[in-house]
Image (cartoon, rainbow, N blue to C red):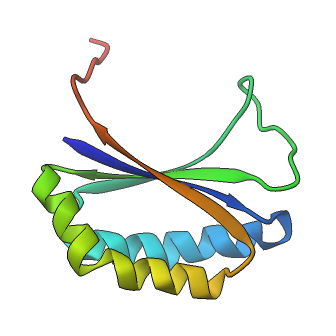
Amino acid sequence: MIIYNVTVSIEKQTEKEWVEWMRTVHVPEVIATGCFIEARMSKVMTEGMYEETPDPSYSIQYLCKTQQDYERYQTEFAPQLQQAHTQKYANKFGAFRTLLDVVEIFQHG
């Protein structure tokens, strides 16, 4: 399994609108590509508590079954979807992406 992680720092005054847009528009569009089986959006925390910072950060993790699914997303869909995000929130965010190869999953019980 591959995790495509996108970490975004968003301006505080834009946070509420951005979170709603991500929930209702962007993430559903990414999932609709068929390249990912699941997505998770998390607010980045420090020391076990939400830290009051000027610009909050979020991690969006998209899970796909294979490297080929991820590559298909990058080739066929990512440019347009990323452009839509960049145009809508120009100069209001910073982002970096990480690709993770799940080695093993540990579960309780």
Res. 83 visible in picture = yes
- Residue 64 percent coordinates (x, y): 21, 52
Quadrant that contains the N terminus: top left
The answer to which image quadrant residue 44 occupies is top right
- Residue 85 percent coordinates (x, y): 54, 79
* Left or right of residue 65: residue 18: right
Residue found 69% across the figure and 67% down from its top: 93
Viewer-nearest residue: 44 or 82: 82
Residue found 61% across the figure and 52% down from its top: 58
- Residue 34 percent coordinates (x, y): 18, 70
- How many labels were placed on the picture? 0
Res. 35 visible in picture = no
Location of residue 7 with respect to 83 vertically, above or below: above
Location of residue 62 with respect to 46 vertically, above or below: below
* Left or right of residue 36: residue 97: right
* Left or right of residue 75: residue 51: right
Residue found 78% across the figure and 73% down from its top: 14
Viewer-nearest residue: 107 or 58: 58
Residue found 19% across the figure and 63% down from its top: 71
Quadrant that contains the C terminus: top left
The answer to which image quadrant residue 8 occupies is bottom right
- Residue 26 percent coordinates (x, y): 46, 76
Location of residue 84 with respect to 91 vertically, above or below: below
Which residue occupies the extreme top position in the image? 109
